[in-house]
Image (tube, rainbow, N blue to C red):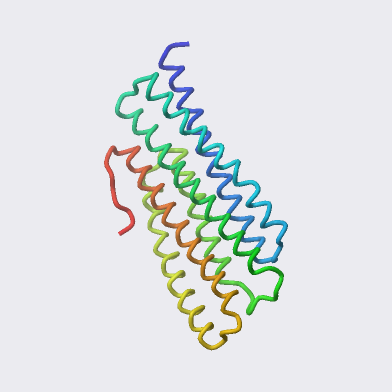
Amino acid sequence: MSVRQGFEEELFALKNLVLEMGTRAGNALHESMEALVTQDIDRALKVIDKDYRINRIDQEINEKVIWLIAKQQPVASDLRRIISSIKISTDLERIGDLAVNVAKSTIRIGEKELFKPLYDIPLMAEKAASMLNQVMLAYDVQDEDKARETAELDNEIDEMYGRLIQELLEYIAKNPEVTSQVAQLSFICRDLERVGDHVTNISENIVFMVKGQLYDLNS
């Protein structure tokens, strides 16, 4: 095996770690929302317990990146792939943390009956999860156009967030007895909005990986 072939295998292994991390972050987001909708405390606790796996992969990616840069002295295009991977893993780790936040809010809400059936918040979570899935596909095949298209979807999540927060605040004003529960739901909306922001960051890093230039896709 040539030096270049060995290096390509290491890059492939790095990419697979990032993809695995994306899958785990997406699963955590899905499970945390299912726990909220069903008010399943045990399910929420499992989301929190499994977060260490995402953190462990993040650490493994960091170590592999340091080794690749130190030992292989990559050229510019390879270096972009390596640097983009570590930046993307940071955003995925934070998405995992946001899923944990949702699980913690679910635990704080507990089994007390929700003040109204949930619909908009799970829909917002579905859009965020769809964005995450799309951006990881874009990363897998280094599809710059798909990355840009995914970033544009964040506008829909931002609009939903603004509308939901306004509705929740208006409900508190009329029904102060549910302030605690509504506050937790507001925190969940904020967490989901941040998922969209992190996916946008991932999109920007994919574009950088492909084009070699930094673009602000959040405008």
Identify which residue is drawn at 52% across, 39% down.
Answer: 19
Residue 11 as seen in the image, left or right of residue 144: right
Identify which residue is drawn at 43% across, 24% down.
Answer: 67
Identify which residue is drawn at 48% across, 44% down.
Answer: 137
Residue 109: image quadrant is bottom right
Q: Residue furthest left?
A: 213
Residue 35: image quadrant is bottom right
Q: Position of residue 74 (x, y in %)?
A: 34, 23
Position of residue 19 relative to residue 35, above or below, is above
Residue 142: image quadrant is top left
Position of residue 196 relative to residue 68, above or below, is below
Q: Position of residue 155 (x, y in %)?
A: 39, 63
Q: How many marks?
A: 0
Position of residue 172 relative to residue 126, above or below, is below
- The quarter of the rendered structure image containing the C terminus is bottom left
Position of residue 204 relative to residue 33, above or below, is above
Q: Position of residue 96 (x, y in %)?
A: 54, 50
Q: Residue furthest bottom?
A: 174
Q: Position of residue 126 (x, y in %)?
A: 55, 60
Q: Residue furthest top?
A: 1
Identify which residue is drawn at 46% across, 41% down.
Answer: 89
